Structure formats: structure tokens, C-alpha cells
Image (spheres, rainbow, N blue to C red):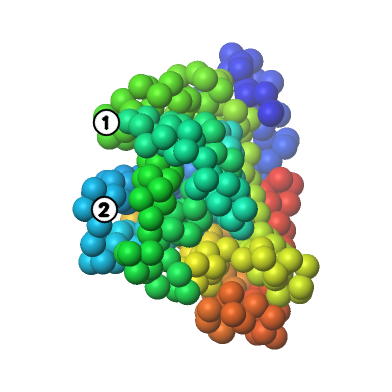
Amino acid sequence: MKKPLVKLCMAVALTAAVCLSGCKKDEPVPEPGTLTNDEQAAAEVAAQFVDHTVAPTYGALAAKAELLADQLAALKANPSQSGLQTACETFLAAREEWEKSEAFLFGAAGDFGIDPHIDSWPLDEDAFHTLMNSPAMLAALEGDDGDVVAGERLGNALLGFHGIEYILFTDGHAKNISDITADQWTYVVAVSGDLRNRCYQLEVGWMGDNAPASHISKLDEMEMSYTVAGGSSSYGQNMKNAGKAGSTYASRNAALMAIMQGCSDIADEVGSSKIYAAWHGEDITYIESPYSQKSIIDFHNNIVSIQNVYYGGVVGQRNNDKSLHKYLSDRNASLDATICAAIDNALAKIDAMPVPFVLHYSDAANGAAVEACAELSDALGTAIDYLRNN
């Protein structure tokens, strides 16, 4: 963790250092306490990222995870095929928001271990069958605090989206309602409650007091952490305050680099892990979303998460003037053009993969997607280096 700037009183020394390290020669030295043009632009990009990419994505994720938990609890009490179909649709809607958040797995998702907690795969089917034969554990999951028991006592390989997916789907479709046992309903209701709680943690972690009061209260009741390093700042505040005392980001430029790094990381993971492991034969069980058969949609939405970050917001909330795209194009138009083309190419190559991935993981077209994701990750890495050195 880099140390923040803590003194602004040494005006002459500080402004001289800023000028020597990064000011353009034709840019006037700012008065003490003011921002350079680059700093102002970076601050606006960071605020746009927090308010119009992270907040709406995690807000929608938390709402859909909450709805899913409610629907599954109702289905446990009164099972119906139509109700199961509706729950499957809600699951996929929540899943879409999660995958569109994976370009920003730093912050709350990383600090609280939420990513592996709710999105580990493959499901440990042996452990699942052991659980189904454990009356004591099932009784604990059946209780009013079953969501807490699930989160604390089930391992990551039995939790989250893929545990729920395993119960609800088979061969890409909703299961027959009669195939879901009473014990499986107990399990899936508890696991969906834990998923909801963790999605609250992401939402409140970034939005702070702007998150729904009921979500904050639930986390407080469970004594779940959601602030930066146990302090008073949300992750959104922390990023918006980059370069100020108390922020974990030493400069506004450091915040932009963190955002760009998140994009580069997920581009690399999609290509080199999510697709490559099965396509190259390293591990044919390492296939995400095999029961719903939505792997390629997951991959696509991961690149959309990069697209939303880079272009300054989710669809309907974008502001090009406050985007990474604009920031970089004003300073290195060629590099920006490379990134824009790489985003489009990665989406196109993923969309050209044969569906479903679980049945066509060795197809040659998948190699083109792997390469496209690598090119995107590399382009974003070049942009990080550019930001570091300019």
C-alpha cells in the first residue's frame, strides 16, 4: 500500500515537485491547493467510475440477489415449475450483473474475499453429496440463521452462484421441480441467503450510506465489515479521495492505474483461464456455469465489464467526457484506439465461440477468443505503463 500525501503546507516544494515530475511545459504551475488539468480530469474519471459504473452494477446485483433469495425461500415452502422457471431467470439476471462487475474485483471484492466465496468452480460434487447425508449440518442450514451457517461453515466450493446453479439447472434448462429434494431446498435457500449477504457487502462497501438502509442494517446485525481497513470510509469515498490524506491511493493517477489494472486482470483471466484451461486440455472440468450452460455469456459479460469501465459508465449512464477512453485519447490517441479495437475484437471472438462451451470447449474458434483476450489485456497493460510514466 502506498502512503498518501499528508502535507500541503510546503507549497513551494510541492508545486515544484509536481511540475518536475509531470506538468506539461506549457501548463501553468497551479496555485497551492488547486489541481492540474490532468489531476482534475483524473478525479472526474474516478468519480464517474464510482457513481456510474460500480454503484449501479452492485446496486442491481444486490437487488437481484435479494429477489432470488426471496423467491427460493417461497419455492421451498410452495414448489412449482413456473416458480422455478422464474427463479432461474432471476438467477441469470443476478449472474449477469456479477459478471459485469469483474473488471473491478479490487476493493471490497478483494479485501473481503468475496470473489472466491461466491464464484468458485467447479462445484465439489463429492462434498455436496456428503452434505446431503449429514442430518446435523442440514438441520443447521434449516434454521433461521441458515444463511450465516452456510457462509461460515460451507467451503467456497459449495457456496455462491454455482451451488445455486447446480440445484436449479440441468443441461441448460430449469430442472423438473420434482427432481429437487427437500434437503436440496434447505441447502439452496441457505446458500442464496449467503449470496445475498455478500452482494450487500459489495454494494454497501462501495456506496456507504448511499446504499439501502436495510442492507446496511443486515450487515451490521451480522457484524460483517464493509469499510476500508475497518475505518469510516467506503471504497467509493476512498477512490474519490485519491491523492488526499487518508486515501489508500497515493495519487489520482494511482487510482486510474488501479481501475485499468482491474480491466487488464479480467481480460487475462477470461482468456488464459476461463477459456484456455478446458480448450487446451489442461482441465476439462474447469468450466464456468456448466449446469446453466451460460459460460459464453459469462465471458461476454466480463468483457462488457471492461467496456463499461473504459467508456465511463453502464449503458444509460455513460459520460465520455469523464471516461478513461477520453482521458487516454487526449494524451495518447493511438493507444486509446488500440484498446477500443481490442475490446470490440474480444467481444466478437467470444460471440463467435460455439454454444454451449461445456460441449464445445475444444473447438478451434475458442483459440481465437483466447488470443483476442490476451491482446486486450496486453493493450490495457501498456496503458497502465503509460499512466505510470506520464
Q: How many marks?
A: 2
Q: Is residue 145 above or below residue 160?
A: above
Q: Nearer the viewer, residue 118 or 270?
A: 118
Q: Nearer the viewer, residue 190 or 295?
A: 190
Circle 2 SS class:
helix
Residue 6 visible from this viewpoint = yes
Residue 200 visible from this viewpoint = no
| Relative image position of residue 345 (x, y in whole percent) | 59, 77
Quarter assignment of residue 222: top left
Sooner in the amino-acid sequence: mark 2 or mark 1: 2
As drawn, is 75 to the left or to the right of 165? left
As drawn, is 379 to the left or to the right of 49? right
Q: Nearer the viewer, residue 319 or 142?
A: 142
| Relative image position of residue 267 (x, y in whole percent) | 63, 62
| Relative image position of residue 276 (x, y in whole percent) | 71, 69
Task: Estimate how packed mark 1 is, as few (under 14), some (14 to 19) or many (20 or more) residues with alpha carbons within 10 Å.
Answer: few
Q: Is residue 233 above or below residue 112?
A: above
| Amino acid type, callout 1 | Ser
Q: What is the CA distance from the residue labelled 2 to the residue labelled 1? A: 23 Å
Image point (50%, 18%), residue name: 231
Image point (41%, 35%), residue name: 139
| Amino acid type, callout 2 | Leu
Quarter assignment of residue 116: top right
| Relative image position of residue 254 (x, y in whole percent) | 63, 39
Residue topped by disc 1: 214
Image point (38%, 64%), residue name: 179
Query: Looking at the rendered structure, which numbered label has been put on residue 75?
Result: 2
Image point (62%, 22%), residue name: 5
Q: Is residue 286 above or below residue 368?
A: above
